Amino acid sequence: MKLSKTILIYLASFICLGMCIIASLALGSKNIEFNQVINSLLNSGNTSFDAVVVRERIPRTIFSIMA
């Protein structure tokens, strides 16, 4: 019982962290739609302005996770 509760807590934490990461990449001075964020992360050859903005926000997101 205790192990399953621990696993559930970790799973919920990782889901919450994932949602925060996507929100951090999407929100800024120029808001980008969530599907565009996912598309920019998965398609590295995308050179649209939104994709460039997402790639510029990745270091901010990584440093905020480490903090």
Image (tube, rainbow, N blue to C red):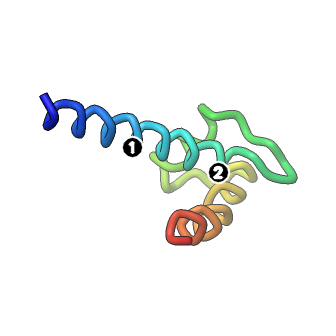
- Position of 7 relative to 56 (above/below): above
Label 2 and label 1: CA atoms lie apart by 17 Å
Q: Position of residue 10 (x, y in %)?
A: 31, 42
Does label 2 or label 1 sit earlier along the sequence? 1
Left or right, 18 with respect to 40, comes to left
Type of the residue with mark 1: Phe
* Picture residue at 75% right of the left edge, 53% below the top: 49
Left or right, 3 with respect to 42, comes to left
* Picture residue at 33% right of the left edge, 37% below the top: 9
**The N terminus, quarter of image:** top left
Type of the residue with mark 2: Leu
**Disc 1 on helix, strand or loop?**
helix
- Position of 56 relative to 47 (above/below): below
Picture quarter containing residue 32?
top right
* Residue on which disc 2 sits: 25
In this rendering, the label closer to the viewer, 2 or 1: 1
Q: Position of residue 4 (x, y in %)?
A: 17, 31
Left or right, 39 with respect to 11, comes to right
Q: Position of residue 17 (x, y in %)?
A: 48, 46
* Residue on which disc 1 sits: 14
Residue most toward the right?
Answer: 29
**The C terminus, quarter of image:** bottom right
* Picture residue at 38% right of the left edge, 35% below the top: 12
Q: Residues within 10 Å of mark 2 (few under 14, many from 20)?
A: many
Q: Position of residue 3 (x, y in %)?
A: 14, 37
